[in-house]
Amino acid sequence: MSEQRLAVLDSSVASRLPDYSKSLFDAKTSKGLTFAAIADHIGRDEVATAALFYGQAQASAEDVQKLSQLLGVPQEAIAAQMMGFPDRGRAGPMPPVEPLIYRLYEIVQNYGYAYKAVFNEKFGDGIMSAICFSTKVEKEVDPDGSVYAKITLRGKWLPFSRF
Amino acid sequence: MSEQRLAVLDSSVASRLPDYSKSLFDAKTSKGLTFAAIADHIGRDEVATAALFYGQAQASAEDVQKLSQLLGVPQEAIAAQMMGFPDRGRAGPMPPVEPLIYRLYEIVQNYGYAYKAVFNEKFGDGIMSAICFSTKVEKEVDPDGSVYAKITLRGKWLPFSRF
Amino acid sequence: MSEQRLAVLDSSVASRLPDYSKSLFDAKTSKGLTFAAIADHIGRDEVATAALFYGQAQASAEDVQKLSQLLGVPQEAIAAQMMGFPDRGRAGPMPPVEPLIYRLYEIVQNYGYAYKAVFNEKFGDGIMSAICFSTKVEKEVDPDGSVYAKITLRGKWLPFSRF
Amino acid sequence: MSEQRLAVLDSSVASRLPDYSKSLFDAKTSKGLTFAAIADHIGRDEVATAALFYGQAQASAEDVQKLSQLLGVPQEAIAAQMMGFPDRGRAGPMPPVEPLIYRLYEIVQNYGYAYKAVFNEKFGDGIMSAICFSTKVEKEVDPDGSVYAKITLRGKWLPFSRF
Amino acid sequence: MSEQRLAVLDSSVASRLPDYSKSLFDAKTSKGLTFAAIADHIGRDEVATAALFYGQAQASAEDVQKLSQLLGVPQEAIAAQMMGFPDRGRAGPMPPVEPLIYRLYEIVQNYGYAYKAVFNEKFGDGIMSAICFSTKVEKEVDPDGSVYAKITLRGKWLPFSRF
Amino acid sequence: MSEQRLAVLDSSVASRLPDYSKSLFDAKTSKGLTFAAIADHIGRDEVATAALFYGQAQASAEDVQKLSQLLGVPQEAIAAQMMGFPDRGRAGPMPPVEPLIYRLYEIVQNYGYAYKAVFNEKFGDGIMSAICFSTKVEKEVDPDGSVYAKITLRGKWLPFSRF
Amino acid sequence: MSEQRLAVLDSSVASRLPDYSKSLFDAKTSKGLTFAAIADHIGRDEVATAALFYGQAQASAEDVQKLSQLLGVPQEAIAAQMMGFPDRGRAGPMPPVEPLIYRLYEIVQNYGYAYKAVFNEKFGDGIMSAICFSTKVEKEVDPDGSVYAKITLRGKWLPFSRF
Amino acid sequence: MSEQRLAVLDSSVASRLPDYSKSLFDAKTSKGLTFAAIADHIGRDEVATAALFYGQAQASAEDVQKLSQLLGVPQEAIAAQMMGFPDRGRAGPMPPVEPLIYRLYEIVQNYGYAYKAVFNEKFGDGIMSAICFSTKVEKEVDPDGSVYAKITLRGKWLPFSRF
Amino acid sequence: MSEQRLAVLDSSVASRLPDYSKSLFDAKTSKGLTFAAIADHIGRDEVATAALFYGQAQASAEDVQKLSQLLGVPQEAIAAQMMGFPDRGRAGPMPPVEPLIYRLYEIVQNYGYAYKAVFNEKFGDGIMSAICFSTKVEKEVDPDGSVYAKITLRGKWLPFSRF
Amino acid sequence: MSEQRLAVLDSSVASRLPDYSKSLFDAKTSKGLTFAAIADHIGRDEVATAALFYGQAQASAEDVQKLSQLLGVPQEAIAAQMMGFPDRGRAGPMPPVEPLIYRLYEIVQNYGYAYKAVFNEKFGDGIMSAICFSTKVEKEVDPDGSVYAKITLRGKWLPFSRF
């Protein structure tokens, strides 16, 4: 575990995020906690937990209480903002300049119409919801030791209304 | 099958794609084939098959032969271009204006930094490859009948070189 | 009826739309039909009917049949494309340059956060769907003779999933 | 009421808004007031009230007095700016990155020309004013319990002058 | 008259305008008519007349008849489109690259807030309409022979509704 | 006069303007002066006066002296910057998001080529200067009580040099 | 002369230029004429001559006559458009992607404020006109054989009007 | 000299420039020095001197010493940064919004391809360097008293390598 | 050789390139030649040869002759354009959407300032020329069989002139 | 060495970088160290070392220890952030405005498709990785004393997966 590196909040990103992001990341760093550990503690998915830290997801009262307890951040300092309604979508620029995030963007750019065609033929005229939606990240190791990252996106299918 | 609706190529998209896209889509429409049926025939994934039609993936000689046979498009009309090297990424504008594709873009916009944080803590400093990569689309039905779309993205983990 | 002016398809817009748009508009012009009349005939809302003409909505087999009959456009010339899956969102540039459409854009620009705040407090953390959605346009005349346009937007409320 | 969540002002949005926005939101949070409650108190629509808080609408002297009294914010701290002339349109980026606001933008993008065609045929050559304009948000529950959000936009019809 | 130079339609602009623009300009060129002469004939302002040619204004039945007669363009070739509803705002790029048009843009850029402040103090919270609007161009010669161009913009004042 | 509302400087605009803008606006607010009153005092046009406050015009030594005296702002605090050379054009974004300023932009967008055509035929190949230029705002009331805003733009005509 | 290479019109640029550009360039190529030779013949500067070919400058009747004679292009094919009023500024994209043109853009980008400061102190508050303007290109060879290109820009100084 | 106006540093530009820009401009203002005077003192061209102040050029040790002496700014406060390597190109936005700088941009926009054609025919395939480059500003007065500004751009001609 | 795949010209790219690009690529495809083979034949580097085909480099008379002979394209069909002066930089959009080209762009984005710092300390204040420049591509295979691509960029160092 | 100039951190760039960038650059300046010297000390490449300073590369524990020792910056002030995961790609704007960085961008713009064609024919369908990647800068002096800069880019070749 001593080898474990932690995601930190770049000071130049912080200005685009709510104030509590910095408090949470600072506490996470000083406690030496991974998102996996925090997710376990609050009973949410790892990606959702990171999204909470970046101000991209809404916290329940219980989330706030548990985060406050685990991280030693006073509840009243974060409750109103974290339980308010997130102003999503502003963590980084689009197109992304971060190589890791760009690769996801590139997948949408290259396969967007292929997904649309397959979705339409499989489900009809509609969309996969990004709201009634969940996602997770997994690690897979091939027999030859190659490491693969796997992202699952799962959203409710919403057909276009006819009117 | 009479109820089956087919993905078609919008005439206004065609000008951004290689010439064979139109030929393939026209043949697909007149034969009344879904991407699922075509994918079965050529032994590739459904998304990869649609990507071939949109000029976003490279065809093998065997792919060309099987598509030619199934769709009745002369092999020599499509082989050179389809077996050449695709000029990827130009099928649609970014940010996407198509609602279905926009939802995927929105997922990257909202969860980009959360993915990065989780990936980094799980795998280290690197990226999930979008090249050494595969993807698939599945349909899931909940016990209450709700329909869910599931996309899986699976890419090789590439650590940044130290130099 | 001789005073009635009809919406026509600007030749410079046509290149961004599917081929059938031009056929439908031409027939509409030569028959001298309003969208209200066509909507009555096919049993859909006026806005949905116009959206069909602009390639922004999907037609049912019955829609195609009725349009074909009313407008004298051969069914086989339009069925595959109109019953395919529309490539939505490309009719005009954004920000809009057309004054009428710009006013709608301006409403989103000015009142976007106000809508969000009111929606959130009334419904919780989520969005109003633009997919499971309908809209209509009405004309109201005040006692003093002033004419008002009224647009109603009605969408399913979709709460963000917790994960 | 204990379950009621309140819209708060994201610290990263505040820099784009007039200074009084922060004061009003802070007071609203500490008093635990919804926009519905504040709108009742000042006798204005809920959306207009939220727009006032975001610096997108002009306050009357009476509005200022009532807000000051309800929220405990000294009148002289806010009167000059709130009764001045709002610098509208700068609360968020366009295209919107917030999913809720994006859905409204998407409606304009997809149905813009359909609205134009229907408006023109119903009213002639002109626009629906976004100035001589009001709007409201309503909640509707279907017999099966589905919740719908309804936005009404109502603006004066302005015909283009002939000159 | 032999010295008179005429505004012509640049072939590279034509693709952004409705088809009748080219017909009208071609006829204007071959008849050797200025916009001033045409405006006289149809009884409209010179700027409005030029706007008609560029597809930025709507023609009345009488306008079409008079233009047809003066220019020798068959009425049926232009009536439907010219009496339809113009798709305004697409004649040129913004920011303008044409030096003459850029100067007008620059005036808005430099004096925009000054106009707003003066308008607001003179008229209250509202806008000068660009719809219920007319404009004209005049030539003035100073005693020393210097030539000045004068544009007058006159629009209805529209106060923001209170709601 | 007690009803008079004053243009104020939005705190979020101030960061784009020179420091003296804030000082001048603050003094204007506390003295309760309109731009009309200030323009009278310094003997300049109302629009030019507002432009001075927004850092879009250069002040003479006499302007500085009179403003200093009227507003009670020490001359030495503002003289160097106001008599320096303005960095014009940065008060607001383009395209404008403020509805009032957008309407002016829209006029350029819609009538730009019409102005060019009329100017060219009236004056030849050249431009209307935006430098050797003046402008004013007037209020007109129609017999029926309708209020109109009128902007006059007057610039020297500059023919393109032949070389 | 056999070594002389001639500027030609790239087929992909031609679509942004007036039709006569292609005719003139084609004739120039087949006659094997440089711009220097053509400029001599018509008695205009070399840069102005090239600008005529690119549709960026207006031709006099005499220019048209001489070009027609020299290049063997029928006068009536080019006179109306070339003597009309050029739609300037659209030959290439900005920022330029052509390396040679980019270097000029870079000079403006890097030295823009330096020029402004020097101009202002030397001439006062105003601009160097780009309309009442001429320019030329010269070749200079240093004693050591190094070749230098020299561009001279000369424009009338226009002071801002005081109003 | 009492009439002499000095270029000052707009406070809103300062944030885009290195810190020493503000120090140098402040000293220049309080000493009442023009760029011409400073250029004489340090033995560099006026434009280069202004470029130094805007952080667009590199200072030699001697430049720093002389500027320090003339302006009374301590050498150690500016030496490291001014003798470091400038981060050029960020003083203002492109396209420029300042009218004076825009005119230079417009010259590139209008005459860019004409310059390229003339350069290519005169010098071959290459560019005029913007690095191995100098520039100067001069004032010319015509016999009739008209004032002209003249900019000279002189750069080494660099032929494209053949490889 | 039967396994060799050839780079082809995507029909959707062709419209941005000079006409000869299509002729050359078509001939290359029908002759089944790689760029390596063509480069050998004409005695130029492989990258330069491909650049010739994409209209990004200038051909010598000998290049044209050899290409004509090898590919069977008549010399007179390509000589004037290929020996003219290329309009560089327009083959694809920037930022690139093609994954391979994006990776090169990303290297500039991520390491740009690092290159600058290292260059400056090694060479002084200046740039690496992209004109007096050559580049090549090599393939390297590691002992473990991993394949590496190596690009070498070599440009003349150009110091900024002091003036 | 007394002549050695050092790369410094422009104060206007610092706000886009992590806080430790400023600390490291300040220490580097006061110690008078080049990147070459620092690279020697920490045993990494010069470009990688500069990239560390700009927050574009991840530090190992040993890197931090050695930098801390060499530069006299307390380890605890920089360890968490430098060993966290860099938020790459934000050091400067794209397209670059800095001339040195622009030249690299221009190489991608001009030769992008040529590289793609050569890579594809040499390696197949894939990309050169920018992650599993290293780069270096070298100085070469020709026999005639001309100085050349050489950049080597070396990345793993990644073939597109077939699925």
Image (tube, coloured by chain):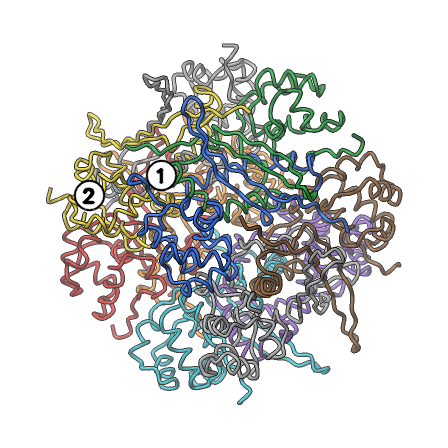
Chain colours: A yellow, C green, D blue, E brown, G purple, H cyan, I orange, J red
**Picture quadrant where residue G121 is located:** bottom right
**Is G6 drawn above or below residue I20 in the view shown?**
below
**Is E47 drawn above or below residue I54 in the view shown?**
below
Q: Secondary structure at mark 2?
A: helix
Give the mark nearest the N terminus, 1 or 2.
2
> Badge 1, how many Cα within 10 Å: few under 14, some, many 20+?
many
In the picture, measured across the screen, residue C24 lies left or right of residue J110, that is: right
Query: Where residue G103 sits: x, y (%)?
Result: 51, 60
**Picture quadrant where residue C20 is located:** top right
Query: Where residue G133 sits: x, y (%)?
Result: 67, 69
At label 2, which amino acid type do we have?
A: Leu
Front residue of G79 and A150: A150
Q: Can see residue H122?
A: no
**Picture quadrant where residue G70 is located:** bottom right
**Is I5 drawn above or below residue E57 in the view shown?**
above
Query: Where residue G125 sits: x, y (%)?
Result: 58, 76
Query: Where residue J158 sits: x, y (%)?
Result: 33, 35
At label 1, which amino acid type do we have?
A: Arg
Instruction: Provide the chain ID for the residue under circle 1.
Output: A
In the picture, measured across the screen, residue I117 lies left or right of residue H155, that is: left
Front residue of D159 and C21: D159
Check residue A67 in the rendering and tell me which mark sits there, or answer none: 2
Kindly report the distance in space between the C-alpha atoms of the residues bearing marks 1 and 2. 31 Å
> Badge 2, how many Cα within 10 Å: few under 14, some, many 20+?
many
Which callout, 1 or 2, points to the residue nearer the camera? 2
Q: Secondary structure at mark 1?
A: helix
Check residue D114 in the rendering and tell me which mark sits there, or answer none: none
Q: Mark 1 — residue?
A: A103
